[in-house]
Image: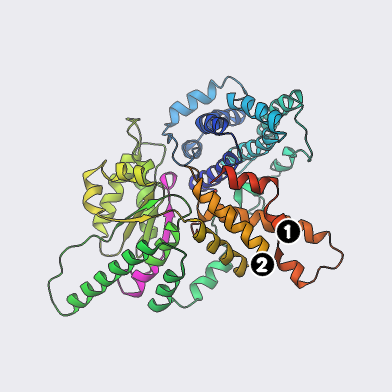
Amino acid sequence: MTAGMVHKQYDEGITAFRRLIPDPTVRLAFAKEIDGFMRKTAMGVWAEDGGLGPKHVEYYNAIYCKGGAVPSILYWDLATQVSEYPGFQPPAFFQKLLQLDKLTGKKLSRRFIDTFTLMLLLFAAVDDVVSEKEAAFVNRCADALTALCNGADIPSDKATLHIQDFVTPNSGSPKPEEPGVPAAATQGSGAQTAETAAKESAAPAPSLDELMAQLDELCGLDKVKADVKSLINLVKVRKLREKEGLPVPPMSLHLVFMGNPGTGKTTVARLLAQIYHAIGVLSKGQLIEVDRSGLVAGFVGQTAIKTNEVIQKALGGVLFIDEAYALSNHDSPSDFGQEAIEALLKGMEDHRSDLIVIVAGYTDLMGDFIHSNPGLESRFNKYFYFEDYNGEQLMAIFRSMCAKNGYTIDDETAKFCVDAFEQMYQERDENFGNARDVRNIFERGIARQANRVAAMESPDKDALMALTVADLADEDAVEEAKNTQAPQEDNA
């Protein structure tokens, strides 16, 4: 598993749990402490076996949530801290979770233990092996937190995770289908099988009209759609002028996508890559998506190599850098993010005829990023702003998910959803996930619907398709609608 995949799984898992915390004070305390706590505990896992390598550095620097401080540890610093690991200590926020559980009757503290355990197993598998010593350490950490739950009389109504099940057998290297990584950590990684890749490569490329129709079908994004169409017209006219031998002023096609998660940035970037290919701007039209961990290495001189490898993969298409602001780390003089930026700028110049780079992230942070380097300012001068979806648009996205997956809702359920999505939009905060939140609600709803239908003696087709208020409005769903605002991809 790459460091980029580790970051994605960590961010999604921790962010999903954070959004379950109803109390804003506890949620803020959790957000402030969790990354540092998890990085420190990861060092405890690695202290069990020793033998650190470059991949451990990359994993460590991938342990952060979006918007949080981006680590940039060097090998010798990590090795020193691992060797001096003082032993596991429960985090301060865990006591706050226990107090909240006692007040509300919930079991967030026990749910955190499951999330925490899976993350530690993910870190343990840095070398594709979860050893007995590493599993024993994870067990001790989980037992320490469980003891606190028991002492606070927090009830448990489900089986404990069997960590021993994840230990890699001693008979050699793990098989490809048994990598020693928790299943929850590998789902949604975006990896393709050879069969899938072969099918995709054999499929005919969509026409420009088909791609523009896909763009128009996206919910909302009216300003973005208009900006895309204007940009395409500009490019098409430039191509026609070149054909007639007319002068064509220099123009940068690199873009900045600004907005919150779940607003369609990745989807629009993928469509743009294919559109540019359809009109002859790019030779291939593929989208290569990375974040900081996919560009930055842990040793001097390796970041430029790593960044150039990514650029080579993206030639002929679009390189999409999510959370690009994480490359600009002003707090650490030894950070290699600047090296990645310099390598990226050189690659953009060397391959300006067959490479387009799109950088994306939160609006305020992206502004700071672009202005952090004169080279970035000169190459990125086109900005697309992705607005949050309103309640009506969230409902349209939900209806689309139902239709595509063969589910139906009656009038009562529709009214409930309309009200819930409008409330979600009106009460949105910094955790608002737009279409990602809709997908999470939809997926939880169909899971509860499956449990309900499985208890029926002979469910008919209508029963198999129907989503009800009960499926969407249990305790967790109501809590989510009121207190959160989290899979794989923007509109998501």
Q: Nearer the viewer, residue 158 or 305?
A: 158
Q: Which residue is mark 1?
A: 449
Residue type, numbered disc 2: Tyr
Q: Nearer the viewer, residue 415 or 82?
A: 415
- Magenta residues (range): 274-294
**Residue 293 at x, y = what percent?**
44, 44
In-image side of 320 versus 457 (left or right): left
Q: Which residue is mark 2?
A: 407
| Secondary structure of residue under mark 1 | helix
Q: Name the image quarter holding residue 220.
A: bottom left
| Secondary structure of residue under mark 2 | loop
Residue 108 can be seen in this image? yes
Q: How far, Cα to Cα, is label 2 from label 1? A: 10 Å
Residue type, numbered disc 1: Gln
Looking at the rendered structure, which numbered label has been put on residue 483? Answer: none
| Residue at 79 percent of width and 40 percent of height | 159
